[in-house]
Amino acid sequence: MIFSIVSKTDKLISIRGKGGADTGGAHPIPIEMSFIYARKAQRIVTFHVSKFLNLLA
């Protein structure tokens, strides 16, 4: 995995990870991930998907 900082503010850091897994098949499996780190709380920000989708409705 290769990680990079996408955005950084005084409160949050947005991080992206990109890589792949070679499981022996014809093509490797791409892996992409992202997360937001809260600096003051010193933890990754989490949310419940259904609550997030309700905000978009």
Image (cartoon, grey):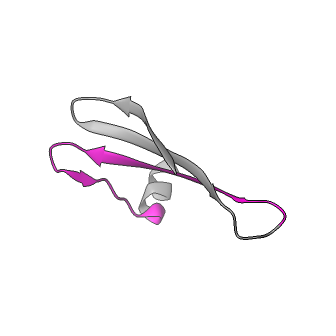
Q: Using the image as rendered, state which of residue 16 and residue 55 is in the foreground.
A: 16
Instruction: Give me the residue at 50% from left, 56% from top.
Output: 53
Q: How many marks?
A: 0
Outermost left residue: 40
Q: Using the image as rendered, state which of residue 29 and residue 41 is in the foreground.
A: 29
Relative horizontal placement of residue 40, taking residue 50 as reference (left or right) = left
Looking at the image, residue 54 lies above or below residue 25: above
- Position of residue 20 measured from the top left corner of the image (x, y, whole percent): 63, 56
- Position of residue 15 measured from the top left corner of the image (x, y, whole percent): 41, 42
Instruction: Give me the residue at 70% from left, 70% from top.
Output: 23
Instruction: Give me the residue at 20% from left, 42% from top.
Output: 39
Q: Does residue 40 show up magenta in the picture?
A: yes
The residues colored magenta run: 26-50
Relative horizontal placement of residue 40, taking residue 23 as reference (left or right) = left
Outermost bottom residue: 24
Looking at the image, residue 31 lies above or below residue 17: below
Relative horizontal placement of residue 29, taking residue 27 as reference (left or right) = left
**Residue 52: quarter of image:** bottom left
Q: Using the image as rendered, state which of residue 28 and residue 32 is in the foreground.
A: 28
Relative horizontal placement of residue 1, taking residue 15 as reference (left or right) = right
- Position of residue 7 measured from the top left corner of the image (x, y, whole percent): 39, 31
